[in-house]
Image: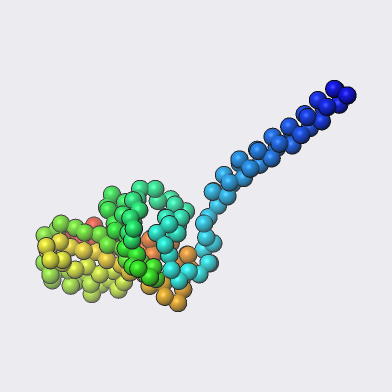
């Protein structure tokens, strides 16, 4: 009887160990998958949901705020602003460049979606907005990030 009991105990221990193994490592597989499919439509995005998108796109250098994310993009700090309703995203970068209003206006004539303006301190502000009203795909949100990166590169290529 003792031998049978040890055999039974060993089988139940084995079942427990398998259960613990599956429970422990199953979340790791899920953590590697994308938080959203690219064709999923969203009308709002929270800070945490946007963090999931950033991580899926390989961004790791960022800080979360209550209504903002400060993201490092090509050695530039970019502020992502999420209004109260979370139905739009605004990306903003500030530059302490000495430039003229004529050059700023010329940029705005050539770039359809991104805009530059001079703030009250005469700093240049590069801004791009994404409206989520009516719904956009996660692929479009990812494209928004890429668009800002491309615009940022074009900005640095300008002779300010």
By what rule are the colours in the image chosen?
A: rainbow
Q: Would residue 36 appear left or right of 118 to someone viewing this image?
A: right
Please state, as top left, top right, bottom left or bottom right, where the C terminus lies in the image: bottom left
Please state, as top left, top right, bottom left or bottom right, where the N terminus lies in the image: top right
Residue 122 visible here: yes
Residue 144: x, y in percent? 39, 64
Camera-side residue of 66 and 159: 66
Camera-side residue of 27 and 91: 27
Residue 83: x, y in percent? 33, 68
Determine the residue positioned at 52% across, 57% down: 35
Residue 118: x, y in percent? 16, 67
Q: Furthest residue to the bottom?
A: 134
Q: Write down the quadrant of residue 66 in the picture.
A: bottom left
Total labels drawn: 0
Q: Furthest residue to the front?
A: 1
Determine the residue positioned at 12% across, 63% down: 122
Determine the residue positioned at 23% across, 72% down: 108
Determine the residue positioned at 12% across, 66% down: 120
Q: Write down the quadrant of residue 111 in the picture.
A: bottom left
Residue 57 visible here: no
Q: Furthest residue to the right?
A: 1
Residue 50: x, y in percent? 42, 59
Camera-side residue of 107 and 124: 124
């Amino acid at each position: 009887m003792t031998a049978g009991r040890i055999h039974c105990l060993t089988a139940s221990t084995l079942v427990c160990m398998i259960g613990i193994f599956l429970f422990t490592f199953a979340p790791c597989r899920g953590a590697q998958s994308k938080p959203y499919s690219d064709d999923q439509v969203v009308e709002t995005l929270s800070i945490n949901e946007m963090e999931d998108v950033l991580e899926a796109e390989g961004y790791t250098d960022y800080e979360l705020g209550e209504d903002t994310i400060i993201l490092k993009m090509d050695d530039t700090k970019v502020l992502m602003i999420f209004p109260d309703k979370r139905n739009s995203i605004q990306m903003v970068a500030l530059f302490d460049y000495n430039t003229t209003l004529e050059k700023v206006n010329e940029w705005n004539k050539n770039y359809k979606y991104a805009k530059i303006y001079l703030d009250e301190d005469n700093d240049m502000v590069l801004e791009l907005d994404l409206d989520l009203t009516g719904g956009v795909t996660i692929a479009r949100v990812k494209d928004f990030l890429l668009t800002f990166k491309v615009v940022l590169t074009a900005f640095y290529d300008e002779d300010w």
